[in-house]
Image: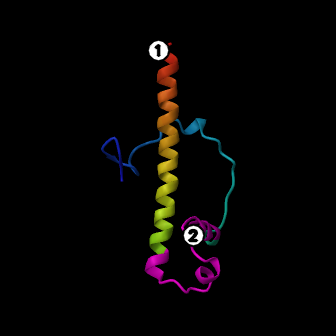
């Protein structure tokens, strides 16, 4: 996954200070549940290990990637807003 041709994990967010930081921390289990829920999977089956481990890992990776995409989209939007307001 790339942003402006640069691997997203290497592309620094330009407006990190402007992101709302709720200061919320949570367990890996909750992150896995969020991933499973976002993917529309059954949480009972997830908790009881009824999905293959490789599949569960891919779901969590997909979920984390989507979070990164949301952050970079927000960052790009803030940057564009700054450009637009400075040209007025």
Return the residue nearer the eye: 57 or 26: 57
Q: Which residue is mark 1?
A: 87
- Locate residue 18, reporting x and y percent: 59, 35
Residue under the image location 41 percent in, 52 percent down: 9
- Locate residue 27, reporting x and y percent: 65, 68
Which residues fall within the magenta stretch? 30-56
Whether pointer 2 and pointer 1 mark residues with C-beta atoms closer than 8 Å, the reply is: no
Q: Main secondary structure of the magenta part?
A: helix
Q: How many marks?
A: 2
Residue under the image location 48 percent in, 42 percent down: 73
Q: Earlier in the sequence, mark 2 or mark 1?
A: 2
SS category of the residue bearing label 2: loop
- Locate residue 46, reporting x and y percent: 59, 80
How crowded pointer 2 is (Cα within 10 Å; few <14, some 14-19, many 20+) is rated as few
SS category of the residue bearing label 1: loop
Residue under the image location 52 percent in, 19 percent down: 85
- Where is the N terminus found, in terms of image quarters? bottom left
How crowded pointer 1 is (Cα within 10 Å; few <14, some 14-19, many 20+) is rated as few
Q: Quadrant of residue 45?
A: bottom right
Residue 80 magenta-highlighted: no
Return the residue nearer the eye: 50 or 30: 50
Q: Quadrant of residue 5?
A: top left
Q: Which residue is mark 2?
A: 40
Residue 40 magenta-highlighted: yes
Specify whether residue 14 is in view: no
Q: Residue furthest left?
A: 5
- Locate residue 61, reporting x and y percent: 46, 66
Disc number lying in front (2 or 1): 2
Return the residue nearer the eye: 42 or 74: 42
């Amino acid at each position: 996954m790339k942003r402006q041709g640069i691997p997203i994990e290497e592309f620094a967010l330009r407006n990190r200070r402007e992101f709302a930081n709720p200061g919320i921390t949570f367990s890996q289990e909750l992150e896995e549940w969020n991933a499973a829920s976002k993917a529309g999977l059954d949480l009972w089956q997830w908790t009881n290990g009824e999905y293959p481990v490789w599949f569960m890992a891919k779901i969590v990776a997909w979920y984390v990637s989507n979070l990164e995409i949301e952050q970079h989209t927000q960052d790009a939007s803030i940057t564009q807003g700054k450009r637009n307001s400075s040209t007025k």
